[in-house]
Image (tube, rainbow, N blue to C red):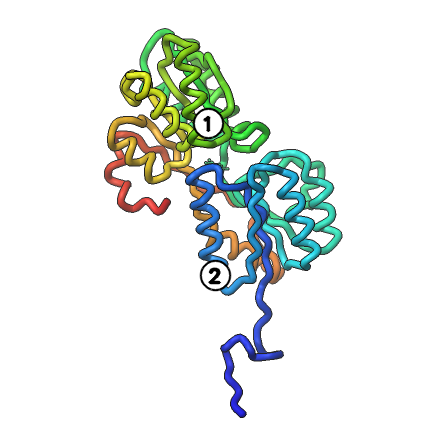
Amino acid sequence: SVFLSGCGGGGDSAEKKLKIGFAQVGAESVWRTANTDSMQREAAKRGVDFKFSSGEGKQENQIRAIRSFVAQGVDLIILSPIVETGWDPVLKEAKRAGIPVLLMDREIETSDESLYAAFIGSDFVEEGRLAARWMVENVKGDNVKIVELEGTPGSAPAIDRQTGFREIVDKHSNFKIIESQSANFRRSDGKDLMESLLKLHSEIDVVYAHNDDMALGAIQAIEAAGLKPGKDIVIISIDAIKEAFEAVVAGKINCIVECTPLFGPLAFDMAEKILNGEPYERRVVMKDKVFDQTNAAAAIDSRMY
Ligand code: AHR
């Protein structure tokens, strides 16, 4: 008989596969699917036994997924939490089972920081500030009327992007947020919300959308109303997906703030360090760039999502 090494049937000599569970938010935006893709690709590349669960926008689904990962005895859990609060009980269950949790993309509010091992993601407050700074520097007028399309209620990016944006707007009395409503980070909701806001307000100068999908939906509504997005109404959004770059180049979006979804390599590096007992940074924050008509065209070809 022959013994083949490296073919997956190596018995005791075969390295144990890492078993990692990922509780994802859902598939609400292009950003989100790019994030899922980045994680799945990297897991496949590293030969990880990867258990993927989509929360479909509901926290209870994510809680159920975490419980099932614990029951399956995974080595580590990656969580991208839909909302900020309400995680302590289930994270305590993971902790009791000795399974470390890595927060990816969104942070949580907790009374016990030891319930998760580390966080990787963007500074959403800073993204809101970057969007507002671009606006106050580039939009002129005595009475600039802004509508804000918010992300999922209770989610870290919706809360923080509002906080950062308002921090700057509050210092400029000529800018006023006249509406602020959620469109759940979804394109179709962005379109519907913008449609009704256009009926409600005869004058809207700026749309600040917490993500590109909602901005792209709003653009459809603005065009259907016979107005020119990017000219009659200034459009500012966050994520910097490829389609938004195209819209900037076409003059329909004025400013996009980057937020990378490409966490795959970094997330699995961190997971391995945590599991191997190697030193790692507990909070890794991405550096986000701002794009507008001055620099989007030059960058578009190198964009990965
Ligand atoms: O948490 C990141 C946000 O979630 C992205 O900005 C948005 O597009 C996604 O749905």
Quadrant in which residue 176 is drawn:
top left
Viewer-proximal residue among 217 and 279: 217
Label 2 sits on a secondary structure element that is: helix
Q: Residues within 10 Å of mark 1 (few under 14, many from 20)?
A: some
| Disc 1 residue lies near ligand 1 with CB under 8 A | no
x 36%, y 33%: residue: 290
Residue plotted at (69% across, 49% down): 67
Q: What's the residue at 53%, 62% (across, down)? A: 48
Instruction: Compare residues 51 and 127 and report the one nearer the observer.
Output: 51
The quadrant of the rendering that contains the N terminus is: bottom right
Taking the image as drawn, is residue 282 in sight?
Answer: no
Q: Which residue is mark 2?
A: 44
x, y (%) of residue 19?
60, 61
Observer able to see residue 173: yes
Q: Residues within 10 Å of mark 2 (few under 14, many from 20)?
A: few
Q: Is residue 159 above or below residue 9?
A: above
The image shows residue 274, relative to residue 148, as above or below, that is below
Residue furthest toward the right? 96
Element type at mark 1: helix
Residue type highlighted by circle 2: Ala
The x and y percentages for residue 158 are: 52, 29
The numbered mark at residue 181 is none
Question: Nearer the observer, disc 1 or disc 2?
Answer: 1
Q: Quadrant of residue 212?
A: top left
Q: Position of residue 45 (x, y in %)?
A: 45, 62
| Amino acid bearing label 1 | Asp
Q: Is residue 182 left or right of residue 224?
A: right
Find residue 112 and report its horizontal and vertical position in percent. Answer: 71, 40
- Residue carrying label 1: 189
- How many callouts does the rendering have? 2
